[in-house]
Image (cartoon, rainbow, N blue to C red):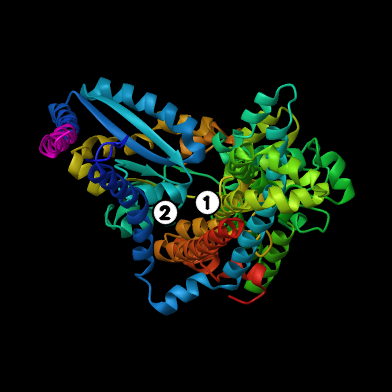
Amino acid sequence: MPPSIYTQLQKRICLNRLAIVGSVVLAALNIGCDAKRSESGGAAVELLNVSYDPTRELWRELNQKFTAEYLANTGVKVTVRQSHGGSSSQARAVIDGLDADVVTLALWTDIDAIRRAQLVHDDWESRLPNHASPYRSTIVFVVRRGNPKGIKDWPDLVRPDVQIITPSPKTSGNGKLSFLAAWGSVITRGGSDEDAEKFVAKLYRQTPVLDSGARGATTTFAQKGIGDVHLTWENEARLEVQEAGGALEVVYPPVSIQAVPPVVWVDANIDRKGTRSVAEAYLKFAYTDAAQAIIAKHFYRPTSEKVLAEHVADFPAIELFTIQRIARGWGDANERFFREGGVFDSIYTGKSP
Amino acid sequence: MRRHRVLPGFGLSLSGTLLYLGALVVVPLSACVFKASSLTANEFWAAVWTERARAAYRFTFGASFVSALATMVLGVLIAWVLVRYEFPLKRLFDSLIDVPFALPTAVAGLVYSNLYVEQGWFGRWLVPLGIHGAYSRLAVVLVLTFIGLPFVVRAVQPVLESLDADAEEAAHLLGATRWQTFVRVILPSLLPAVVTGFALSLARALGEYGSVVFVSGNMPFKTEIAPVLIVARLEEFAYSEATAIAVVLLAASFTMLIVINLLERWSSRHVA
């Protein structure tokens, strides 16, 4: 083939490719425009709710209820897409550009990270009731059938013959709350910081496996049969026991931590997408009696006194201490206990934090 | 006259290659270095050289090295059997070798830990003997061996296939023992392929995360691997510190691969 034709051909191939790439980009832009048009037209809106792992079933049911109600009231058809994963990884995804309209995560610190990325306004905690948290949860024990080791309370965990399963506080929200609950169980009963430190050090030395996430720890305990007691979310514990068909039991310690999983709308995203009114309505809906009943059904503690009273048999009244009992707040607790070289690390290094 | 080539145009194929390498390899890796460079030298050092991080590096490299050695021995053996013998279901065995390539490694991790825990099929017999094949260092080596095995087999197999049986017969006729034939005749021609397989298997093990988190138990100072530390730092939203650890791993793996490449060249020259 003579070189001139050859180079011409080459050029044409390049041009063709450019054209293809160009049309793909155009098509993508077009799709974007279409979505916008239908939103502003008020006919259909899509929301993305970025949440943590165990809330799959909860939000699925809440979404159904909300979309039906919203359609009836306003004539707007809302579709809610869900994304689930580890709480901190989900926060990271939103910071890195996942286009969430609302985030519903496990920990205050995860929302705070999104705030620091300037995606959420500074006042997020006061925009919705109860520190922007429509439900509470806590950490409870799961033990084997008949509770063979007689585990009733926190001090029972550190008897030499007991092995504990809970995920790593470094990588898991469940792990962090288990640690804080154990710490607070000492403090709220009048123990000093040194007592608490000794207690958690003993506890983690009797933890043979530190899974990276909540579900991993559940598998280790329930399926692989490792350990005598599993420290986990109340709602996870109830599901785990249901699944195990009689092989496991829930034990409520007399005292545990009050977890406050926050929900926020992501201001930067909803203002750009024009979904603010729907996103706000969506989260406010979570506080209504109808939503609170669904929340209770999935073993999360409703914040509505009325609904809680209706489900009082499901939620034993144990003492739930707030984070302020053991630290200035969630951010402070995180910094003190879980940062590199903090209290948790000192259990393994033997060096004081 | 232009020489006829199968692929059109050196310019086009080279630019394709560069584009691919640039977009998929060089840019992401330099982004990693770039992110880590937002730390000062002191901060970088503090992030990557804690006692816990050093323990994790030692364990990561140690376990990877041991498992790569194991895959090397096992891999050569398996390749030998597959090439030199005929037996029923050989094709099936041959394709089974590739399973670790395709299987999500998390699945391997889950299955291994299930087998070796006290109530598992293997653990039931092994744990009373004091052999803990789950949530221990041994567990990590086991699962890394599983993952690395096909790299050695697939590197050695084609070379073994192309080896002439004549040379072995000649060696035998000239009075060489079986061992001498193996060490002096077969091994030298296999060596470059074995080293390649070893290097691939080692490199794969160094970066492995999915399976290891399920079998190791993630105990700090005992069975925690360096990639777990990276994830832990990410969970704290400490991006720069996390990438700093990644950069250390990257640099170490890169150095190792260069050394192994040199070894490989040396061994192929040695043979010729």
- Give the secondary structure at mark 1: helix
Residue A221 appears anywhere in the view: no
> Which residue is rendered at x = 25% and y = 48% of the image?
A267
Q: Measured from the top left, where is residue B138 in percent x and y?
A: 74, 53
- Frontmost residue, B59 versus B92: B92
- Give the secondary structure at mark 2: helix
Among the two numbered marks 1 and 2 on one chain, the one whose residue lies closer to the N terminus: 2
Q: Quadrant of the C terminus of chain B?
A: bottom right
Mark 2, residue position:
A110
Mark 1, residue position:
A173
> Which residue is rendered at x = 19% and y = 44% of the image?
A271
Q: Is residue A153 above or below residue A104?
A: below
Q: Which residues are the magenta region?
A: A1-22
Q: Main secondary structure of the magenta part?
A: helix
Spatial CA distance of label 1 from label 2 is: 10 Å
Q: Amino acid at mark 1?
A: Gly
Q: Amino acid at mark 2?
A: Asp
Q: Are marks 1 and 2 in contact (CB under 8 Å)?
A: yes
Chain of the residue displaying label 2:
A
Q: Quadrant of the N terminus of chain B?
A: top left
